[in-house]
Image: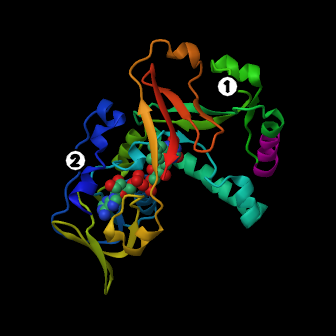
């Protein structure tokens, strides 16, 4: 990974980092270490993997090129709700109803893991996610609610236009589905909270330590870093979309996309037009999503360009 790629990740330039207390830097790897599992990447995938391994008594070393949460995990919308990008109907079509249900339950388990990691963390945790329709979708939304309850045992609340507009001051919105169990939080603080739970007697964490390359060795894998190396029985790449040449053929499978998120200055009128603390999203493809942060700022995201 080149220096320019690494510095492009600058988590310290995000609003989340700007308003959070400064985090102490974990050490830079400066020698040769041996472990069971080497995890490359300190986003949510790498951090939760390290946590799960520790729960099973498996030692690991996690190396992060920049700081914990420097990638998408520390700068995203902070929405957390069960389900997958593909949607239940598409998954059912491909795998059948029984497997789709198992996958949905797995995603619920993931939400509970996140919630558990947030206990005691200063991460602005708030419940509720409201998905609103930009066209009249009363029947379709009620069918979705019924199907989810019947086939997946998961309850959503249906809101008619009047109820939606009592919460959001926009004539563009029609009906909505509310998930009272979904939640939202400060994602950078979530990453830091997970890192803080990792016990150094079984899990070592190194920051500002990019993996430069990997090679097979007798006992598994050797991972090279600028000032040291890790010898591990297993290697797990959790580089998100940020892995460079070092991830080899995997890189060819990436579809680079850019998606956008912004936080406004304080807006004194905000709570008069958004009368809910729920996270809100609309039904457009790569649609708008937003939530109130820090009392009177709007965090808004949307759009994807390739
Ligand atoms: C703007 C935006 C908004 C989003 N909103 C939401 C949302 O509201 N809810 C939701 O569930 N999802 C959301 N997502 C998606 C979510 O953030 C990602 O799916 C998730 O964070 C991916 O986690 P990850 O650990 O796989 O990758 P990342 O968080 O990207 O972590 C990868 C890490 O690997 C490190 N790395 C890369 N190469 C190396 C190397 N060679 N050596 C060492 N370290 C390396 C990087 O520095 C980085 O820290 C959003 C994404 C974006 C971009």
**Image point (34%, 46%), residue name:** 196
Q: Which residues fall within the magenta stretch?
A: 143-152
Residue in front for this viewpoint, 2 or 28: 2
Residue marked by disc 1? 172
Choose top left, top right, bottom left or bottom right for residue 210.
Answer: bottom left
Q: Is 15 part of what is drawn in magenta? A: no
Left or right: 126 as drawn, with respect to 152: left
Residue marked by disc 2? 25
SS at badge 1? loop
Q: Can residue 153 be seen in this view?
A: yes
Q: Residue 227: percent from the left, percent from the top?
A: 15, 66
Q: Can residue 62 be seen in this view?
A: no
Q: Which residue lies furthest to the front in this view?
A: 306
**Image point (28%, 56%), residue name:** 5
Disc nearest the viewer among 1 and 2: 1
SS at badge 2? loop
Residue 253 vs 86, above or below: the answer is below
Q: Residue 264: percent from the left, percent from the top?
A: 41, 25
**Image point (49%, 32%), residue name:** 300
Choose top left, top right, bottom left or bottom right for residue 189.
Answer: top left
Residue 289 vs 57, above or below: the answer is above
Q: Is 150 part of what is drawn in magenta? A: yes
Q: How far apart are marks 1 and 2 (CA)?
A: 46 Å
């Amino acid at each position: 990974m080149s220096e320019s790629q690494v510095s492009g990740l600058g988590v310290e330039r995000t609003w989340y980092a700007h308003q959070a207390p400064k985090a102490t830097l974990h050490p830079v790897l400066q020698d040769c270490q041996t472990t069971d599992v080497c995890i490359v990447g300190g986003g949510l995938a790498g951090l939760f993997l390290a946590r799960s391994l520790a729960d099973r008594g498996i030692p690991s070393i996690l190396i992060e090129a920049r700081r914990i949460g420097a990638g998408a995990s520390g700068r995203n919308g902070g929405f957390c709700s069960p389900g997958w990008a593909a949607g239940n109907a598409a998954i059912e079509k491909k795998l059948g109803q029984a497997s789709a249900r198992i996958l949905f339950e797995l995603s619920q388990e993931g939400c509970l893991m996140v919630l558990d990691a947030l206990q005691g963390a200063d991460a602005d945790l708030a419940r509720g996610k409201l998905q609103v329709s930009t066209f009249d979708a009363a029947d379709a939304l009620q069918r979705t609610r019924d199907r989810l309850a019947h086939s997946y045992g998961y309850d959503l609340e249906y809101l008619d236009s009047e109820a939606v507009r009592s919460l959001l001051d926009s004539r563009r919105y029609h009906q909505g589905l509310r998930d009272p169990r979904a939640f939202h939080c400060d994602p950078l603080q979530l990453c830091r909270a997970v890192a803080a739970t990792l016990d150094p007697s079984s899990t070592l964490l190194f920051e500002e330590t990019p993996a430069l390359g990997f090679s097979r060795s007798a006992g598994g894998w050797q991972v090279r870093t600028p000032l040291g190396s890790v010898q591990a029985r297993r290697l797990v790449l959790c580089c998100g979309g940020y892995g460079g040449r070092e991830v080899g053929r995997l890189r060819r499978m990436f579809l680079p996309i850019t998606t956008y998120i912004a936080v406004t200055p304080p807006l004194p009128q905000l709570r008069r037009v958004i009368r809910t603390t729920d996270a809100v999203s609309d039904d457009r493809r790569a649609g708008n999503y937003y939530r109130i942060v820090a009392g009177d700022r709007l965090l808004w995201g949307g759009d994807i360009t390739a």
